[in-house]
Amino acid sequence: MTFWWLIPAICGLSFALTAGLRRYALARSMLDVPNDRSSHTVPTPRGGGVSIVVTFLSGLVAMWSAGLIDSGFFLGAAGAGGLVAVIGFMDDHGHIAARWRLLGHFSAAAWVLWWTGGLAPVEVFGMTLDPGWVGNVFALFYLVWMLNLYNFMDGIDGLASVEAISVCGSACLLYWITGHEGFVWAPLLLAMAVLGFLVWNFPPAKIFMGDAGSGFLGIILGVFALQAASLSPDLLWAWLILPGVFIVDATFTLLRRLLRGEKVYEAHRSHAYQYASRVYGRHLPVTTAVALINVLWLLPVAIAVVVAGLDGAAGLIIAYVPLLVLAVKFHAGESEVKTVQGKDR
């Protein structure tokens, strides 16, 4: 029995649910009102990412029932993603202290590692390393950082959606050309769930994703990376390369803010993509540029790693260096006051 019908079904369901969530948000006045730390100018409904959560988890159930995914991956991804989404949903509707959010995030990450068996051996510059418990600690923090950085990067119209679709689509291509066609299903259905939402989130956005959706996407992409590591060390490196725009911008911005002694969990507008959107005066050019970087730069480097034999660590460096240059060019992590003063001069 074929399950290709899931592709349009997941996309259509996500589109319809997002429409319903938008009406609900408008009726309950759940609006993201612009302030001095916002990148938008019009009050916009939020919380639409719940449609991504519901449709993808529904797809996971269907795939698990059909034997397309194993129980460990299903329980790990569904349990962790669901917990992160609930925390994000509650935070969207009120406020949860940062320490409790982090506790929930680490619990979700630990749940993933429990059910998936932890981080598989990795290959670095030709050496195969079995990281053991150290690797699992690294994987724990990696998952927590992925879900938080995705939340940080969900700040302009369509960006988080386009990132998820292009990364998952690229991963599907890599699975296909390396003979792992059976692993295409999960990222493909996630891309379809996001595509249905993107129709409403494309610039100018009619609804925002919210913490429930962005955190969910971040940890699910992290789970995909750990799953890929169990197939091949090269595929793990590919999954680290493909979301490079988000990883570099968020990490570089965080480090610069930490060095200035700022509270990194507070809202701000100092990511490179936020500065870029103000330079160009619109969100669409930045969102489009990220999609092009993913497809025309990061995907070819990932293909070179999994097909042409390029060392994974070397590929990561090659992929990230231009992204780091862009982060510096667009003032990632700089104080807005300093940037404005610099322009005035």
Image (spheres, helix red, strand yellow):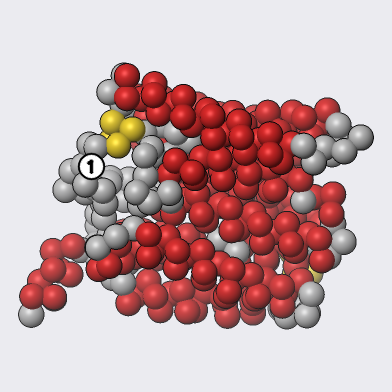
Identify which residue is drawn at 71% across, 41% down.
Answer: 7
In the rendered image, the quadrant that contains the N terminus is top right
Furthest toward the right, the residue is 1
Between residues 99 and 47, which one lies in front from this camera angle? 47
In the rendered image, the quadrant that contains the C terminus is bottom left
Q: Is residue 38 above or below residue 319?
A: above
Where residue 11 appears, as percent x and y from the top left, is: 62, 38
Occupied quadrant, residue 276: bottom left
Q: Is residue 67 visible?
A: yes
Instruction: Answer left or right for 257 relative to 306.
Output: left
Instruction: Answer left or right for 103 relative to 35.
Output: right
Q: Is residue 309 above or below residue 306?
A: below
Occupied quadrant, residue 82: top right
Identify which residue is drawn at 38% across, 37% down.
Answer: 207
Local packing at callout 1 (Cα closer than 10 Å; few below 14, some 14-19, many 20+) is some
Between residues 259 and 91, which one lies in front from this camera angle? 91
Instruction: Answer left or right for 330 relative to 296.
Output: left
Please state which amino acid type lies under the numbered disc 1: Val
Q: Is residue 89 visible?
A: no
- Count every numbered label the image shows and give the total: 1
Identify which residue is drawn at 82% across, 66% down.
Answer: 177
Where residue 312 appears, as percent x and y from the top left, is: 69, 73
Instruction: Answer left or right for 324 relative to 257.
Output: right
Where residue 333 appears, as percent x and y from the top left, is: 30, 64
Q: Is residue 328 above or below residue 175?
A: below
Identify which residue is drawn at 64% across, 70% down.
Answer: 299
The residue labelled by disc 1 is: 42
Where residue 215 appears, as percent x and y from the top left, is: 49, 41
User: What kind of element bears circle 1?
Assistant: loop
